[in-house]
Image: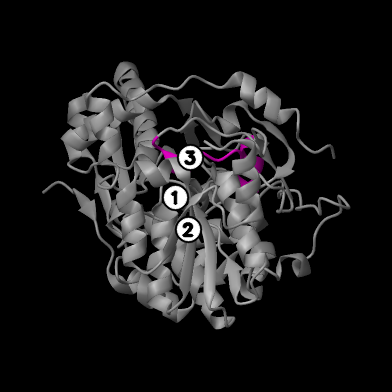
Amino acid sequence: MEVMKVVLPEKEIPKKWYNILPDMPNPPKPPLNPATKEPIGPDALTPIFPMALIEQEVSMERFIEIPEDVIKIYSLWRPTPLHRARRLEEVLKTPAKIYYKDEGISPAGSHKPNTAVAQAYYNKKAGMKRIATETGAGQWGSALALAGALFGLDVTVYMVKVSYNQKPYRRIAMETWGARVLPSPSNETNAGRKALEVYPDNPGSLGLAISEGVEDAATHTDTNYSLGSVLNHVLLHQTIIGLEAQMQFEKIGDYPNVIIGCCGGGSNLSGVSFPFVRDKINGKDLRVIAVEPESCPTLTKGEFRYDFGDTAQLTPLLMMYTLGHDFIPPPIHAGGLRYHGDAPIICQLYNDGIIEAKAYSQLPVFEAAITFARAEGIIPAPETAHAIRAVIDEAIKCREAKEQKTIFFNMSGHGLLDLGAYEAYQSGKLEDFKYPETKIKEALARLPVI
């Protein structure tokens, strides 16, 4: 019988996360204090993060132990299966083998609980009562709301307004797990009020929602801030995906030639690829492709320089590819990819030529999503559909070249709460936003000078 999926036993859940920093040829440049332009120390992060996560943020240990209490919760859905997409291969008539890791089986429906559970655990141990955060499409907010319920923490979520309106069921899911959800920009923070004064119809952005979450945490002693992507410790927690995948490929005697992941802040791409990127750094022939929206093309059209991680300039300066901290992307349905920057680790790997990047507009992405859904049965999240578009294009190249390759991607989340976007696409109402070159140039002109 042909292998359709590889399922690891629960006892094989990885016991350690993988930290890529010690293996990078050029580690990312340090975050800077905006006032002094000097590297910040751990003390600067203590008002909003527990020390355990700060230590992980700067750690140079290759492997970091996963707490037993975190593994117990992971076991609710982990290990996740590795699927062979044979029906998609047949539809595409490609000699390529296509595999995907199904992270959509988590209770929140995406890969995000891999770090949400860990962050909630460390905040609970540090004595916090509440966590403030942001969310784009709602997948991160859902994951943290779930983790807060499991650890007895209150959660406040600033949800990007365009997604708050587009995706009401994600808000309802968060509220069902006990979180308080506010449309961002809101009237509850200085950052939100200022944004609304300037632009009353502001659709919001991840950068602005981050400003609100950071401000909330910094002004309440019982509250910490939690981020769903970008930071080193977040990417670290997600590597459980790639670590499991390596064991699964070993069981079937295969190994990917191409790894593909959608990329907004970088947590999904890093999680599925970093254990394999280590192999590439050590000489393995392997391509890793980050896929982003053409309307928010951070890696493909951004500048590699220091910028704020948020709109209100509350964060340290991060060395990354950026479109400008006050750039507001068009309101595409892949809300989790509407971020002006990217994780510094991802950006450094891209700058060094270790990973690649490509961008797609919204209509071909949804075309790929429907092709996948009709072949494999799973309706993917709009973010994940960006990766699927690239997978299909790579598989077609293999067909045209009569070349067999193994293509691997992360099914980072299902789209069952994104059906409004599918309805818009299938009725011909989904807008294909153009690359906002003028607005990006204006935002880049306002970047800090280092």
Q: Identify the residue at image location x=15%, y=46%.
A: 2
Asked if residue 335 is positioned above or below residue 34 in the image, the reply reads above
Disc 3 crowd, CA 10 A, few/some/many (<14, 14-19, 20+) = many
Q: Amino acid at mark 1?
A: Val
Disc 2: which residue: 238
Tell me how far mark 3 sits from mark 2, CA to CA: 17 Å
Tell me how far mark 1 sits from mark 2, CA to CA: 8 Å
State the mark number for residue 195: none
Q: Identify the residue at image location x=52%, y=51%.
A: 274
Badge 2 element: helix
Asked if residue 149 is positioned above or below residue 206 in the image, the reply reads below
State the mark number for residue 337: 3
Q: Amino acid at mark 2?
A: Gln
Q: Nearer the viewer, mark 1 or mark 2?
A: 2
Q: Nearer the viewer, mark 3 or mark 2?
A: 3
Q: Is residue 191 visible?
A: yes
Badge 1 element: helix
Q: Which quadrant holds residue 350?
A: top right
Q: Identify the residue at image location x=63%, y=52%.
A: 211
Q: Which stretch appears magenta?
A: 333-350
N-term-proximal mark, 3 vs 1: 1
Disc 1: which residue: 272
Q: Identify the residue at image location x=36%, y=55%.
A: 171
